[in-house]
Image: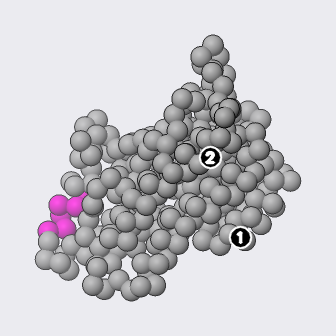
Amino acid sequence: MTFPFPDVSSDPLSSLMDLSGRTALVTGGAQGLGRAIADRLAEAGAGIVIADLDEQRSRDAAASIAERFGARAVGVRMDVTDSASVTAAVDSAAGEVGEPSIWVNNAGIFPSESLFEMSDETWEQVFAVNTRGVRNGAREAARRMSDGGVIVNIVSTAGFRGTAPGLSAYVSSKHAVRGLTTQLALELAPQGIRVLGVAPSYVPTEGNMAMAAAAMEQMAAAGLDPSTMPAAMSQSLIGRQGTPDDIARVVLFCASDLSMVMTGSTLLADAGETI
């Protein structure tokens, strides 16, 4: 069996980082970490599809990226839990920016509810977005990457360990995404598709700050000291908290030919937090 991954050892660094002629789709890309990722991929030359539940916000983000980087960019509505929505969104965008050769599964939710208070419906919704959504996205990407490509799954340090009280569904779903990343790499390698995970620690985005506030409330309700939460979430060995762009640059590495020899790994982008 031939695996179509070229040896790029003789290519110049500028070429290895150049995404010109490629199209990157980022789920949950209208704000926060997804938006930072889309910005860096556009800066590297990729055409961009911002896929988000909020169609207007996705269109606004795409317009901003096009103006800032001169990139081909389009915003579409996508519900990652719904296979038909995923397919329809890509069909809509492909005519404007082309089929994706880079797909970033970034959309995720993280409600904070104790094990005893969390409903079955909430548990199922977390897995629908965080895990089934990754499966849906990766499957759609693989169907369209006839010439190979890269799938990057945003995992979390929660895919390696437990975190704060109230996040049992989130932690479980991210462990599942880490395993799915490995299995997808195995299954898709013959098609020339690399699959990598990036596991950020806490970075200050709109969603993460809301999650942190909810988790602190859960700690207080459980009789724990919520003031320990900020310290626990920022055990950095680099002297500062990470930023969305810190994570976006790791995703850029994964999406580019710089990482050609890598597939199946999940890269910890955690400032040493999990050591």
Is 246 magenta? The answer is no
| Type of amino acid under label 1 | Ser
Estimate the x, y position of residue 200 in percent, counting from the top left.
Answer: 40, 49
Please, what secondary structure does the residue beneath circle 2 have? Answer: helix
Eye-nearest disc, 1 or 2: 2
Marks 1 and 2 sit apart, C-alpha to C-alpha, by 23 Å
Is 229 magenta? The answer is yes
Q: Which residues are magenta?
A: 225-230
Q: What residue is at 60 percent from the left and 33 percent from the top?
A: 256
Q: What residue is at 55 percent from the left and 51 percent from the top?
A: 184
Q: Residue under circle 1?
A: 85
Of the 4 image quadrants, the one containing the C terminus is: top left
Sequence-first tag of 1 and 2: 1
Is mark 1 in CB contact (under 8 Å) with mark 2?
A: no
Please, what secondary structure does the residue beneath circle 1 have? Answer: helix
Query: Taking 36 as reference, is 113 above or below it?
Result: below
Estimate the x, y position of residue 214 in percent, counting from the top left.
Answer: 33, 72
Q: In the image shown, does 139 or 75 lie closer to the viewer?
A: 139
Q: What residue is at 22 percent from the left and 55 percent from the top?
A: 232
Q: Residue under circle 2?
A: 188
Regarding residue 60, the answer to whether it shows in the image is: no
Estimate the x, y position of residue 246 in percent, counting from the top left.
Answer: 45, 40
Q: In the image shown, does 242 or 94 lie closer to the viewer?
A: 94
Tag count: 2
Of the 4 image quadrants, the one containing the N terminus is: top right
